[in-house]
Amino acid sequence: VGCSGFIFVPSATLTSLSAVTDTGMKRLALTDADKTVRDWFVEEAKGLGCNVTVDEMGNIFAVRPGTNPDLPPIYAGSHLDTQPTGGRYDGILGVMAGLEGLRVLQENDIQTNHPIGLVNWTSEEGARFPITMISSGVWAGVVPLEKAYASQDVGGSGVTVRSELERIGYLGARPATSEATPMAAHFELHIEQGPILENNQQKIGVVNGAQAYKWFTVEVKGRAAHTGTTPMDTRGDALLAAARMINHSNIVANKSGALASTGILTLEPGSVNVIPSHVRFSLDVRSKSDAIVTEVEQQLKRDFAAIAQGRDVEDCTPPSTRTLPMEVTWATDYHSPAVHFDKGCINAVRTSAAGVLGSSELFRDMTSGAGHDSVNTSKHVPTAMVFVPSKGGISHHPEEWTSDKDCSLGAAVLLHAMVRYDRG
Amino acid sequence: VGCSGFIFVPSATLTSLSAVTDTGMKRLALTDADKTVRDWFVEEAKGLGCNVTVDEMGNIFAVRPGTNPDLPPIYAGSHLDTQPTGGRYDGILGVMAGLEGLRVLQENDIQTNHPIGLVNWTSEEGARFPITMISSGVWAGVVPLEKAYASQDVGGSGVTVRSELERIGYLGARPATSEATPMAAHFELHIEQGPILENNQQKIGVVNGAQAYKWFTVEVKGRAAHTGTTPMDTRGDALLAAARMINHSNIVANKSGALASTGILTLEPGSVNVIPSHVRFSLDVRSKSDAIVTEVEQQLKRDFAAIAQGRDVEDCTPPSTRTLPMEVTWATDYHSPAVHFDKGCINAVRTSAAGVLGSSELFRDMTSGAGHDSVNTSKHVPTAMVFVPSKGGISHHPEEWTSDKDCSLGAAVLLHAMVRYDRG
Ligand SMILES: NC(=O)NCCC(=O)O
Ligand SMILES: NC(=O)NCCC(=O)O
C-alpha cells in the first residue's frame, strides 16, 4: 500500500473520544485516574503488536517493529494527563491518533523501514507537579532527574513524582535519556489551543516551532494597616501595587506584540479591613522572539520597581495616589527559549497536509503558543508538530472541543508524515 | 473622694500589656485563645466585686453595684479578640482600662449612683466570622441573631458563631438585647489606629462619631483559557479586569476624599498557564459623609461594568487592550452609616480630657475612621469614645503600639468621664 493511497478511517475509540462535548476531563498526572488510562494504553498497544516499555520517569514507549532492525523508531508522542479543569483533547488526541495510526498500519499490514513508536510522556501539564513537560525534559536532559523526582504535589500533600510513580506501578528501570531510548524522529499531533486555524477556516497547522516563554513569581511587600483609619497617601498597599503591575504588564506586552498573563495571585493577611502587606503573583511572558521576552522582562523589572516606589509609569496612575515605598522581588521559575523544528519533519507534515487536504488554503505554517513535549524532543531528534483547530480557541477548559472530522484529518496527516519520513 | 481629685495609677497588668512592642497578638474570636482570655477576664472581674453574666452572643457583662438600685449601669466596653496579624491594643486596651477603672473604684472605695459596668463584646473584628461588631450589633438590633449564629469561619471549616460559642462554653441564655441588658451609657477607650493624634502631638481624641462605611464583595466572571495560545485581544481575563477595578477604585476614592480598599482577593482556577475565569474581591468604601459613600459606590458600579466590557475609564487603560465582555456582580456585605455620638457623653469626655491633661492643645475633637462597638451602642444609649495615639498610625499589625503613658492617660480620661457622667 503506497503512502498516498492510504485512507484514514477514524475508529470507534477516536469517534467516542471526540463526541463528548458537554464535560471536560480531570486526570492529573500520576493519580489513580492516570494509572487507569496507562493500563488501558499498555493493553491497547500490546494488542496492536507493539513492544511496550517504561522508563524511570514512567514514560511509556510502544514500538511496532520495522524491516530494518538497525534503525531507531520514528515516534508519535504526546500525553494523557490533563489540567484540573481540562478538556478531552489537549495531549490525549496525540496519543489516541498514534494508537489509531498503529492500528491502521497493523490492519493493513503496512511494513516500514524504521520501527514506528508511540510515546505517552508523563505529566506534561505541570498542573499537579509544577514543572511542565517534566518527563520529556528529563529524557532531553533539560530537567535533572533528581529535580523531577523531588517535585511535590501543588496541593501540599507532600507526595512527589517519584513516590507517585512507585505507588501507581510506573517507575521503570531504564534511564529516561535519549541514549537509552533513541528516536529517529518525533511527530506530535495536538489541538491548537488557540483561535488562529478556526478564524482562518483552516484545518491543519504545520507547526514550525514554539514561542519562547518565561515564568516568574513576583512578590510585593508593603505594610499591613487599617483600611478605615489609614489615609490613602500614607499606605503601602501591596495589592494596589500588584494590581497596577498586572495592568501595566498587559500594556507593555501589547506594545511588544508579546503575551503577559497572571494566573495565580495570593495575598496576606487577607482581611476585609486590613490593607494587604504581601502579594505574590505569577507572571507568564511569551513571544516568538527570545529577544522580545527579554525586553519585556527587563522593562517590567524597571517599571514594577517604579510602581512599588509610587513613581509614575505609563498606565497613567495619577500622582494623587501616593504610596509608601514598597519592595518588589522577582524569581524565575521556568524558561523555555524559542524552538525551531526540523526542516525535514516540517516538510513531511506540510506535504502530508497537502495530500490529505487537497487545497493549500486549508493549512498554514504556524508557531505553537504553548510548550509541548516536542519542544524537548527537538533538542535531540528531528521533530515537528501537527495542529488541528480548537473551537473558540478554548483550551485548559472543559469546553475544549475539536470536531470528529478535524481529529481524523489530524490523525491522517500525522500518520502520513511518519510514513513519508520513513520512506525518506 | 471627688472625681477631680482622683489620680489614676496604671497597674502592673496595664504596664506589662503596653510594654510588649516586639510582637503582635493573634486571638481570633471564639478560638481556644479567646476562651483563655475570657476565663481570665471573668476571674479578674469577680475579684473586683463584680457580678458577671454572659448573654446568648457570649458578650460578658461585669457590673459593680451603685448606690441607686433602680439605675442601669454606665458601661465601659470594648473587645478582646484581634485580627490574624493584630496588635496588643486594638480593643484590648479598652477592656483592660475598664478593669483598671473598676480596680481604682474598688481599692479607693468609691461609691457611684449608677452601677459601673464593663462589657467584653464578642468578635468585634470580623476577621474570623466576617461581620464586624457582630455581637454589639445583635444587642443593638442591627444584626439578626440567626444571621450572627449562622456566620461561618472564613477558613471554610464550616464551624459557625453558634457552634464555637457552645464549644468554648460562652453560649449564655439571656437575650442579647438592649432590653435584657440595659445601659445608662457606653464609653469606649480605643487606640486611634491612625496617624492624626501623633502628627499633631496630641494625647487624647474626643470622638464625636464614626465615619460611614460599606463593604462589598465584587465578583468578575471571565473565561479560562491558555496563557500561551490565546491572543491578548480575545481574552476574558477576570484578574486583569479586577486589577483595573482595584486601581480605578483607588483613583475614584481619592478624588472624593473617600477611602477605598481591597483586603481579600481570590481567583479560579489558579494555574500559571490558565487565564483566571473567576475573581472575587472585597471592597471597603469609607467617608465621613453617607452621601459620598453612596456616590463612590454608584460611580464604581458604573465604571466596573465599563471595565468588564473593555470600555475606557479614566485610569487610561489603553484601547489596545481589548477584552471579551465579562460579567461583574456586587454583593453588599455590611453597611455602617455615619454615626454622631451623644452630646452629654462627648462633653463628659472633653471635660475629663481637659482635667487630666491641663492644656487644651493636648486633645482634639475627631471622627473615628473605624467602626467600633460604640457605633452600635450609640443607636440605643448615650455613647462616646476616647482615642489615644497609635505610633505611626499603625494598627491591625503586630507593630501596633501606644506608650504606657498614653494608655494611662486614656484610662484616666475614660474613668473620669464615667464618674462625671454618673454625677450628672
Ligand atoms: N500545551 C500545554 O498546555 N503545555 C503546557 C506548557 C505551556 O504552558 O505552554
Ligand atoms: N476598630 C476596628 O478595627 N473595627 C473593625 C471595623 C472596621 O473595620 O472599622
Image (spheres, coloured by chain):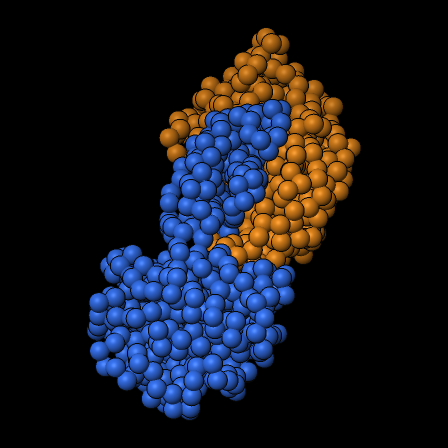
Chain colours: A blue, B orange
State the residue in front, A344 or A24: A344
From what the image shows, is residue B365 above or below residue B289? above
Query: Split into 4 quadrants, where in the image is the C terminus of chain B?
Result: top right
Q: Is residue A90 left or right of residue B415?
A: left
Residue occupying image coordinates x 61% and y 30%: A316
Residue occupying image coordinates x 51% and y 75%: A355
Q: How many marks?
A: 0
Residue A274, image quadrant: top right
Residue B146 image position (x, y, % from top left)? 67, 56
Residue A263 shows in the view: yes
Residue occupying image coordinates x 59% and y 46%: B240
Residue A188 image position (x, y, % from top left)? 42, 69
From what the image shows, is residue B123 above or below residue A91? above
Residue B1, image quadrant: top right
Q: Is residue B371 left or right of residue B127?
A: right
State the residue in front, B15 or B326: B326
State the residue in front, A151 or B280: A151
Q: Is residue B349 left or right of residue A149?
A: right
Residue B250, image quadrant: top right
Residue B126 image position (x, y, % from top left)? 58, 45
From what the image shows, is residue B404 above or below residue A177? above
Residue B136 shows in the view: no
Residue A390 image position (x, y, % from top left)? 57, 66
